[in-house]
Image (tube, rainbow, N blue to C red):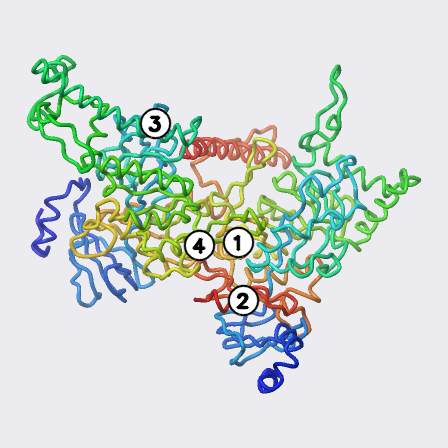
Amino acid sequence: MNAMLLPLSLGVVCVLSPWLAAQEEDDWTISADMVYTAAGAPIEDGVVRVQDGKITAVGKGGGGSLEVAAITPGLIDLGVEIDTGLYSVEQSRESAASLSVADALDLFSFQWKRELTSGVTTVLAVPADYDVVGGLGVVLKTGGPATLEARLVRADAVLRGALGTQPSSGNNAPRFGDPANFYYRRPTTRMGVEWVFRKAFYDTIQGEGVTEPAIAADHDVLRRVLAGELTLSVAARATQDVRTAIYLKEEFKIPHMIIDDAVEAWREPELLVRSGASVVLPPFPADGRVDDGFVNDSYFVPLEAARMLHDLKVTFALSGHGSREVGTRLSDQAGLAQRGGLAFEDALAAVTLTPARMVGVDQRVGSLEVGKDADLVLWNGKPFEPTARVVGVLLNGRLVLDPRPASR
Amino acid sequence: MKNPKLPPAARALCAGVLLAVGHADGKLVIEAGRIVTQAGPDIENGRIVIENGRITALGKADEVEKPWDAVVLGGPKTVAFPGFIEAHTSQGMDRANENIDVAPFLDIRDSIDPVAYYFEDCLRYGITTVNVQQGANCVVGGRGMIVRPVGMTVEELTVRPLYGLKLSARPKNGKSRATQMQALRYAFDDLKHYLEDLVEKERDERGYAKREALFQGRDLEEEKAQGRAMGGTAWKVDGLDLIPRGALDEKFAPLLDLVEGRYAAFIHCADPLDVAHALEIARANGFLARTTLVIEEDCWKAADLIAEAGVPVVLEGALVDVRRDPVTGEEQETFVPGVLHDKGVRFALSSESPSTRAPAFQAALAIGRGLERAAALDAVTKVPAEILGLGAEVGTLEVGKLGNVALFNGDPLSVTSWVEHVVIEGKPVYDRSKDVRNKQLLEGVQPANTAPPSKVDAPDPEHADEAGKEGAQDEKKEDEKKEEKEEKKEEGGGKGGGR
């Protein structure tokens, strides 16, 4: 295709230049010393062909219009924390299952570009965890036109919930003599949070309060969770919160659950395996400790946590939490997981195909296979090693980060 | 003990240096699949012989004789690398900052905590030489020192006592930039006025300074009993030769050393404008030639100024400056070592950088961002050694230099490689297989005999059932958490004070 285009373009460049420009932007043949497809064995001296936003060929060969050291699929982050903080979550109710973060996302935020240029092409966005049941999350691309339609990969991909200290943070028990304000409300403790969670599901099963439309809508969403049509993503960091999440899963027989930001999930291997829940690990801190941030407590995650979960055959993904600091982003997490003993291919899966499967978008993204979205990350060395970095990114077949001027 | 194999030049060096080689007995041989000497090409299948703390032979394994009585470390998969050098840190101290604005009379040695977690971490990362200086929350800080991160007493740690004075161009807490600059200028003005007064008094009533010093019990023997004309290049006080050096107030003596160019200065700069201020003070008082700037990432904007002044820098901030453009709101990433390299600034990377403390990781990240491999490796070995005036002692693996070696189990720049052993002056001081805290960091398992005794060890007969067991385990976890928290507090205190 490219070989045919070249003489053609020389002849009619004046007439057809706008058309050609569009063609060139969408059609790429990229060769690399190593192509890591995440869908099979890596291909040495491989080539990936991209047309009209989709991958049209993956295989052996060279001589592409771009040549780099390595290609991986676009990275996928389920814990990117790219919300609008308090403004992405309704705080007048503790359970707001039918609200969607899609209505509160700022697609003009500068953070999207940070993710995109560091290789993250698809993310799961969820409401901030100030509610017990925060609302619906969406899977979307990190670039392209700043409209939800253009970026959406999957609407209503998960229902977000949160355990632990954050949902009750800022709340106070009503006190005699003080004027009433918004924050005099429950829950104020871990057990209160769990109670709200449980009540939301009991009310749904009992059909409590369905005369109110908002509550009826919430019940519809929760019923889909109970029926296994919707995945429940629960933030649970401390060991006790991980346990609570699993007990809730078992109590209400929730078929699909992701335990997000699961700092201490590794401490409960038997429960994890028994429950069948999948896990999103937080970024690895340098000293293993994650501060609670809301109460004076910290949680511990060892470097081998990813390897441990892999050995237990627990489905898990890594996350970057939208870090600003170079050296601590999602691609760096895949390196640190290897430092903890995880094999390269498993680390690659944990930032590509596995998260795609966890939120049900693996038909479109997550690996380099013919027919999938042309989201590619181009590297100047072995991916995830500190001596290499992301030099190029293709999103839906468009070159959004060009490796040529930067590759030095 | 003199070594006949040592070249004369190296032997002369050994005799001349201030370095206190504490532990020196025995011979050590390091076998390595690869030796990164940093002094020439890498050596495949190499061997290093260290005797009495110094490297006495180094080369291909089949060309270097192995002493029959030497301890042997390493193997074919080992990669030997010169011990990393930390050109500046404010960690490893009880508290990093003194409250007094101008405190050059203080000595860091009184504050150093030999069992600080920081020194343990240094070994984990293969750091063998550390320059400890007061924190940046000062105007003129106390005098620092160069240490090796191993030992139970400050004496054992000491490589070079009384080395370097910390100054800060960034405002100390509670000061504006203007008052900080004023305080810096006044520090040297005060010195000048003090010396002038002293000389005047000496001329008016002979022996005043000497009598006062003796009255205060200060020793005036040997060179301290001698007066000496003021040295240095900036400003001078005439008649200083009338005053015995031992008669000078200890509060001012270190500052005078600085002005006379006999002491090194480390000036902290948080923002680009601090760089100009730091250079102004150093120029005005004649210690520019002995100045190192300790910079945060934003200071790349002042790279031209730094290059023009010809001073080296220690990059204490992040490798990549991530900042939003005030006009467009777009986030810009600037690779700081790249800018410094292009402008011809000599720079050392620091493990203080927030992403991780390992210098090997910093160097690797810098290479990934496009810095030449040699420049990146020099920035964690040779350049910091030169900054500290230890270029002839450490920083490369060469015959005659100190036997400071980090032994990796793979490519030092790979994320999967670990420091397996560390050798400082020929003595094996770190073995990863015995590093219980690293094991905990990796596996999350509290090693045996490091936690307070819990009920698990002594089961209560009443609660010997399943539930009781679980409860006991929970309690143990609580204990662990408490311990972690306490450690955190300690560390947090040290760090917080450092900035």
**Distance between mark 2 and mark 4 Cα atoms:** 17 Å
**Distance between mark 3 and mark 1 Cα atoms:** 45 Å
Q: Are discs 3 and 4 less than 8 Å apart at CB?
A: no
Residue that label 4 marks: B335
**Distance between mark 2 and mark 1 Cα atoms:** 23 Å
Residue that label 1 marks: A333
The image position of residue A380, as x and y in percent, is 47, 66
Residue that label 3 marks: B183
Label 1: which secondary element: helix
Q: In percent of the image, x 53 and y 53: which residue is there?
A: A329
Do the dots labelled 4 and 1 sit on one chain?
Answer: no
The answer to whether A402 appears left or right of A201 in the picture is left
Q: Nearer the viewer, mark 2 or mark 1?
A: 2
Q: Nearer the viewer, mark 3 or mark 1?
A: 3
Q: Earlier in the sequence, mark 3 or mark 4?
A: 3
Q: Is residue B482 above or below residue A258?
A: above
Q: Nearer the viewer, residue B38 or A338?
A: B38
